[in-house]
Image (cartoon, rainbow, N blue to C red):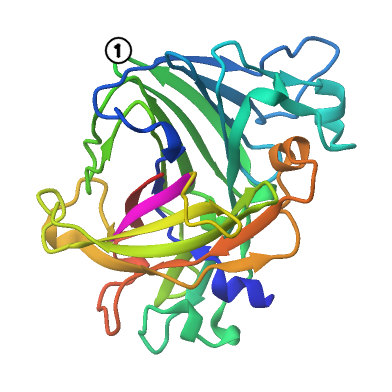
């Protein structure tokens, strides 16, 4: 088992909202025109493998554009690109992209308009036998971990839905194993035209400069009675940027009683304190799809680690060309001596902002 495992696993239900901070001045009142396209420009004879899709969501502002690209070729990934143009567009060289023969097959043109780009990649689901009931994978013996579920090998179904206020793209998948016979891992991406709050707890605020990625594990058969799960994810960005995790106090506990902290994983230019992008979450998870207060459990993050290779994501390999920097983070759930294990509910969830 790799050393990276212990430092870069995340929750089984995670919501990520994405934005670049440099243009958020009027985020609560500002509106964007949101549109979506599936596999833009793909024509025969080029064909994607079964179950694989590339969704491009475009958030058009007054003088800028947010491009979100969600793709499950290899490990599923969400790419965000912010441009200072209303005419910027995603272009895909489909034969090269499908064969994954070289980088640069997916780009945003004109490239001179790109202000910031980053990708969030979901790489593995880890399951461990928490025999000592610490709810802390970093303090768990390596021998207590089961073989991980490699998300690059999952089979997925894709669904796109839209209404007047937001747009949602959902990926659900699993392995052809007994564990996933009646269960699945789902990733749900949302983009918004205006500000609001998500209905699902912890009901974090979003605006037109935000996106949301909701992740949940439901109905999977654990391999042990004391099993807990974690989801490993990595962030990939251009060279010249570095990441850190800050923890801030928050008085906004109306939707998350007794939770007064917010964790924020930020991206900054090297040798600068300025922030150009972020991932943000509250340290709370839920054990039921429609939770009450008693269904909440704490979550915590590990230290951020630098990774010396990019993940096995077709989207990341296609977009990033010049020595991108990759970081990993671990978000785990539960507390020491927590009496509830995954087998008791077969569900776990949480939410975050980006």
Classify 195 as above or below 250.
above
Q: Residue at horizontal 38%, vertical 64%? A: 246
Residue 55 found in image quarter: top right
Task: Determine the image quadrant of residue 327.
Answer: bottom right
Task: Point out the image quarter for the N terminus.
Answer: bottom right
Say few, some or many: other residues with alpha carbon within 10 Å of mark 1 (under 14 / 14 to 19 / 20 or more). few
Work out whether 75 lies above or below 284. above
Q: Give the residues drawn in magenta, as a range.
A: 277-283
Q: In front here: 79 or 227?
A: 79
Q: Is residue 47 visible?
A: yes
The residue that disc 1 covers is 164
Element class at badge 1? loop
Residue 258 x/y as whole percent: 12, 64
Which residue is rendered at x = 47% and y = 32% of the image?
A: 170
Pick the front one: 285 or 227: 285
Q: Is the magenta stretch mostly helix, strand or loop?
A: strand
Q: What residue is rendered at 18% in x and 62% in y? A: 259
Q: Position of residue 49 (x, y in %)?
A: 75, 29
Is 226 inside the magenta-drawn segment?
Answer: no
- Percent position (x, y) of residue 38? 60, 17
Q: Where is residue 339 in the image (x, y as percent from the top left)?
A: 25, 78
């Amino acid at each position: 088992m790799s050393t990276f495992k212990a430092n870069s696993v995340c929750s089984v239900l995670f919501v990520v909202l994405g934005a670049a901070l440099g243009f958020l001045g009027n985020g609560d009142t500002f509106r964007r025109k949101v549109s979506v396209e599936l596999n833009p420009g793909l024509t025969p004879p080029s064909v994607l493998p079964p179950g694989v899709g590339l969704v491009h969501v475009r958030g058009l502002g007054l003088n800028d554009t947010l491009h979100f690209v969600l793709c499950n070729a290899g490990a599923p990934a969400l790419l965000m690109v912010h441009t200072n143009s209303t005419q910027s567009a995603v272009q895909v060289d489909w034969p090269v992209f499908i064969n994954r023969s070289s980088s640069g097959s997916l780009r945003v043109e004109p490239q001179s308009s790109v202000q910031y780009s980053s990708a969030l990649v979901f790489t593995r689901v880890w399951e461990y036998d928490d025999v000592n009931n610490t709810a802390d994978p970093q303090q768990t013996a390596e021998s207590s971990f089961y073989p991980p579920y490699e998300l690059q090998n999952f089979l997925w179904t894709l669904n796109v839905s839209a209404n007047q206020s937001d747009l949602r793209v959902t990926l659900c998948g699993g392995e052809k194993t007994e564990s996933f016979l009646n269960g699945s891992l789902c990733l749900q991406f949302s983009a918004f035209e205006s500000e609001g709050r998500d209905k699902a707890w912890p009901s974090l605020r979003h605006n037109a400069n935000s996106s949301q990625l909701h992740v949940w594990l439901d109905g999977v058969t654990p391999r042990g009675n004391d099993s807990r799960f974690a989801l490993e994810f990595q962030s990939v960005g251009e060279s010249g940027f570095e990441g850190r995790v800050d923890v801030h106090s928050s008085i906004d506990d109306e939707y998350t009683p007794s939770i007064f902290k917010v964790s924020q994983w930020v991206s900054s230019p090297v040798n600068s304190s300025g922030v150009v992008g972020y991932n943000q979450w509250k340290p709370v998870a839920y054990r039921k799809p429609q939770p009450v207060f008693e269904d909440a459990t704490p979550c915590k993050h590990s230290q951020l680690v630098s990774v010396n290779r990019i993940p096995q994501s077709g989207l990341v390999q296609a977009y990033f060309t010049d020595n991108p920097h990759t970081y990993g983070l671990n978000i785990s759930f539960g507390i020491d001596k927590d009496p509830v294990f995954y087998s008791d509910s077969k569900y776990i969830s949480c939410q975050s902002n980006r």
